[in-house]
Image (spheres, coloured by chain):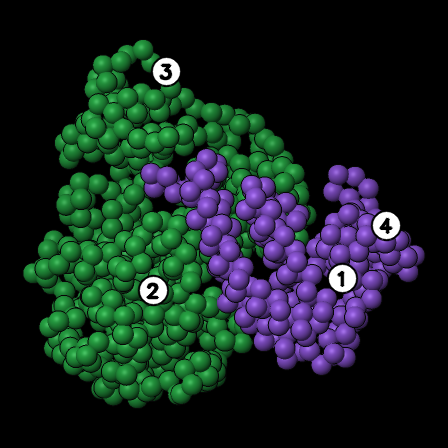
Chain colours: A purple, B green
């Protein structure tokens, strides 16, 4: 199993600037545990904290290098490269569909003009969410393959399912608009696959 | 023939059977315009394919006969080593499904035919480049048919865009191997088999998950199917007097009555639409190829007269000869829609009532356009082509991810080398758009216009990094505030002074006509005045 310190380090690698509560949500650790790991990592010079509106914890150059090394080591030690590569190719099939759906959630055509979806038409939103659910069923198979290869990937299944469930219960911001939204978690998974396989953007 | 119809002025059939693209080609024939010889495989054949999982009985024979017609019309041989005939294969449904399109170019350029083309033209580079484009477009179509957005091995399907200039032979070998892996057999090197493969791929792509989702969201029935247009190629990359372009009969930004568009010399048409290459303003054709320019003006005039509306065409000229490849109405929005409707009424092409029906009250939201104050001494960082009018002020984001993330905290200007459908959420999140490449019909320009977002495209010398942009020797980091003027094509540093001009003369006149119809002269909101008139005309909006 991936250690808590690497989970926290890698959460910052894939999610960018984050506070302890977001790191906790990403990793599944308790917030206090996440914060304690962040402080230890800061002492080791791998992460740093900035104040202000755009502040939060982020990787140092040394942290980025350490993450790359340890994530690669974990992948090879588990003999998981082939399985993760195959899952990444499956992910790439689904990725354009996810982007289409996010666009459809944000915009719709009114009198030939693309217009911001004001979410005033529940039947339209329901159609988009139904399409999300169809995509999510196929995505869950990819996540299952990934989790079988490297258990830390199992967290994405939990987070994606949670975002969709909350959106369907009426918390519409969980589709594209929050740091816990389906789209954000998906983008982190994309970044994670690239980072894990060492593929540059 | 049961499944295939040759296209001519006499071709019968609705857009539902022939697809909108073939229907447009029939119109061009009827207007006496030059169209490369073509036939269409109907939507009925697609429906049969989707039902049975294979091309319908007898289609192979009909394809051979129809190809024979193209051979007779062009004096060339499909797959032949001497005077080889190459064709384009394009999807074309009865309803518009932007972004769900497949195009295979230069099909029929087998190994032997490409050698024949090289011998005929004395230009092996042209022949190899054309064969490479065939394979790369075929790979994309097969990928779409499988529902994937990327080619096997994770390489982007659109990645083969540089024509393999360094090593075309190597690029050809690599693509053949890639397609072969996907097919589980070698790429057929026989023209008729290539054609059946491409037609099947286009039909299959109708059922890709992306296409299904698009139809679900837009209320398009799943059982329509798509038609396939097969057309003799004309080569915009043939020689120094060849090229491709797109043209509107009027300016899609302002509605002004002058042709507007872009042209790319020495390249094939998909390079223009994708915005991958630096295009030139359409007007330059007038000096460079006067006969092509004159022919284009004549065509735009005839098409406008038929539609009684602004129009859009795609064209190619080969060795100085103009060919039209596609046509549709212009579909302008905002101030451009107002001006075109008003001027068409002035010209007597349509009545005033029709003019009122041409403009949606929704478009009026986009009519009043702010500009950089010319007296405001803005610090202009860069100039490009104004692709969608209006002002956007925001922090620079250089990726869609960053745009989405940063938009939560305030307006964002998305700065990209170019955009693709994959940038849609970044475009949606951004207040304004700037791209280094592409012209007024590039993806970024079309999407920005559709969303009413100020955009400047084709900014020469703009470099875009992971979280920085550099232009004119100045580097800006992510989040630096810039102002985009999508009318004048300027990108200024910071927040310079903005002016808003009063509604223009065209809008005043259109609204006066609206008041004449509604009988209500109490003034008020512009959209309401238009709405009131349209209600009288029976086309008011009936919604919640």
Mark 4 sits on what residue?
A32
Q: Tell me the CA gap for discs 4 and 2.
A: 51 Å
**Mark 4 element type:** helix
Q: Nearer the viewer, mark 3 or mark 1?
A: 1
Mark 3 sits on what residue?
B524
Q: Residue A10: give its label.
A: 1
Q: Does residue A132 appear left or right of residue A44 in this picture?
A: left
- The quarter holding residue B14 reads bottom left
Residue furthest to the right in view is A43
Q: Tell me the CA gap for discs 2 and 1.
A: 40 Å
**Residue B406 position in % (x across, y down):** 64, 44
Q: Tell me the CA gap for discs 4 and 1.
A: 18 Å
Q: Nearer the viewer, residue B85 or B217?
A: B217
Q: Residue B206: give its label.
A: 2
Task: Please tell me if label 2 and label 3 are on a single chain.
Answer: yes
* Residue drawn where x is 31% and y is 11% of the image: B522
Q: Are marks 4 and 1 in contact (CB under 8 Å)?
A: no
Residue furthest to the top in view is B522
The answer to whether residue B179 shows anywhere in this view is: yes
Task: Please tell me if label 2 and label 1 are on a single chain.
Answer: no
Q: Nearer the viewer, mark 4 or mark 2?
A: 4
Q: Tell me the CA gap for discs 2 and 3.
A: 47 Å
């Amino acid at each position: 199993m991936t250690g808590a310190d690497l989970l926290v380090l890698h959460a910052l690698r894939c999610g960018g600037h984050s506070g302890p509560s977001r790191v906790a949500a990403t990793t599944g650790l308790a917030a206090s545990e996440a914060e304690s790991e962040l402080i230890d990592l800061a002492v080791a010079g791998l992460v740093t904290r900035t104040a202000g509106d755009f502040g939060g914890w982020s990787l140092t150059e040394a942290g980025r290098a350490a993450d790359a090394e340890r994530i690669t080591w974990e992948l090879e030690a588990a003999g998981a490269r082939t399985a993760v590569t195959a899952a990444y190719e499956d992910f790439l099939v689904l990725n354009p569909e996810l982007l289409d759906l996010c666009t459809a959630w944000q915009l719709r055509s009114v009198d030939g003009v693309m217009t911001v979806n004001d979410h005033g038409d529940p039947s339209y939103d329901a159609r988009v969410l139904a399409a999300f659910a169809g995509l999510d069923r196929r995505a869950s198979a990819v996540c299952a393959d990934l989790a079988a290869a490297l258990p830390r990937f199992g967290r994405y299944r939990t987070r994606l399912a949670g975002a969709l469930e909350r959106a369907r219960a009426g918390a519409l911001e969980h589709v594209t608009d929050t740091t816990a939204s389906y789209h954000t978690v998906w983008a982190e998974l994309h970044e994670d696959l690239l980072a894990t396989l060492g593929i540059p953007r | 023939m049961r499944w295939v119809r040759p296209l001519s002025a006499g071709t019968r059939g609705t857009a539902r059977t022939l697809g909108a693209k073939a229907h447009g080609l029939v119109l061009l024939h009827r207007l006496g315009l030059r169209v490369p010889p073509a036939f269409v495989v109907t939507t009925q054949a697609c429906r049969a394919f989707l039902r049975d999982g294979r091309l319908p009985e007898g289609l192979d024979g009909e394809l051979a006969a129809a190809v024979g017609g193209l051979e007779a019309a062009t004096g060339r041989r499909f797959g032949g080593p001497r005077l080889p005939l190459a064709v384009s294969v394009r999807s074309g449904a009865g309803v518009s499904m932007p972004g769900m399109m497949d195009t295979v170019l230069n099909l029929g350029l087998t190994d032997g035919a490409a050698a024949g083309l090289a011998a005929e033209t004395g230009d092996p580079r042209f022949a190899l480049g054309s064969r490479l484009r065939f394979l790369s477009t075929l790979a994309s179509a097969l990928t779409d048919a499988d529902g994937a957005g990327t080619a096997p091995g994770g390489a982007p399907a659109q990645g083969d865009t540089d024509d393999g200039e360094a090593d075309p032979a190597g690029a050809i070998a690599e693509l053949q191997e890639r397609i072969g892996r996907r097919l589980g057999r070698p790429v057929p090197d026989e023209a008729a088999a290539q054609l059946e493969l491409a037609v099947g791929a286009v039909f299959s792509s109708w059922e890709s998950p992306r296409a299904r989702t698009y139809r679900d969201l837009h209320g398009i029935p799943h059982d329509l199917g798509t038609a396939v247009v097969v057309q003799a190629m004309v080569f915009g990359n043939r020689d120094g007097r060849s090229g491709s372009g797109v043209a509107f009969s009027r300016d899609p930004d302002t509605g002004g009555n002058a042709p507007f568009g872009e042209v790319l010399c020495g390249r094939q048409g998909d390079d223009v639409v994708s915005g991958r290459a630096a295009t030139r303003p359409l007007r330059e054709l007038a000096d460079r190829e006067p006969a092509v320019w004159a022919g284009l003006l004549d065509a735009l005039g005839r098409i406008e007269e038929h539609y009684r509306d602004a129009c859009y065409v795609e064209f190619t000229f080969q060795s100085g000869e103009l060919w039209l490849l596609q046509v549709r109405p212009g579909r302008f929005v905002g101030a451009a829609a107002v001006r075109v409707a008003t001027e068409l009424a002035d010209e007597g092409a349509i009545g005033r009532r029709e003019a009122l029906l041409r403009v949606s009250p929704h478009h009026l939201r986009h009519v009043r356009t702010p500009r950089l104050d010319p007296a405001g001494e803005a610090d202009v960082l860069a100039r490009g082509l104004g692709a969608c009018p209006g002002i956007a002020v925001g922090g620079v984001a250089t990726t869609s991810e960053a745009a989405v993330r940063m938009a939560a905290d305030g307006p964002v200007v998305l700065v990209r080398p170019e955009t693709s459908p994959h940038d849609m959420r970044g475009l949606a999140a951004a207040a304004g758009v700037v791209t280094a490449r592409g012209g007024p019909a590039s993806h970024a320009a079309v999407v920005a216009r559709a969303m009413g977002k100020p955009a400047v495209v084709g900014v020469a010398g703009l470099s875009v990094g992971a979280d920085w942009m550099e232009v004119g020797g100045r580097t800006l980091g992510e989040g630096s505030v810039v102002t985009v003027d999508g009318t004048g094509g300027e990108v200024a540093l910071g927040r310079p002074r903005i002016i808003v001009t009063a509604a223009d003369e065209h809008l005043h006149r259109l609204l006066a006509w609206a008041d004449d119809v509604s009988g209500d002269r109490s003034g008020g909101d512009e959209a309401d005045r238009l709405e009131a008139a349209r209600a009288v005309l029976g086309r008011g909006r009936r919604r919640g």
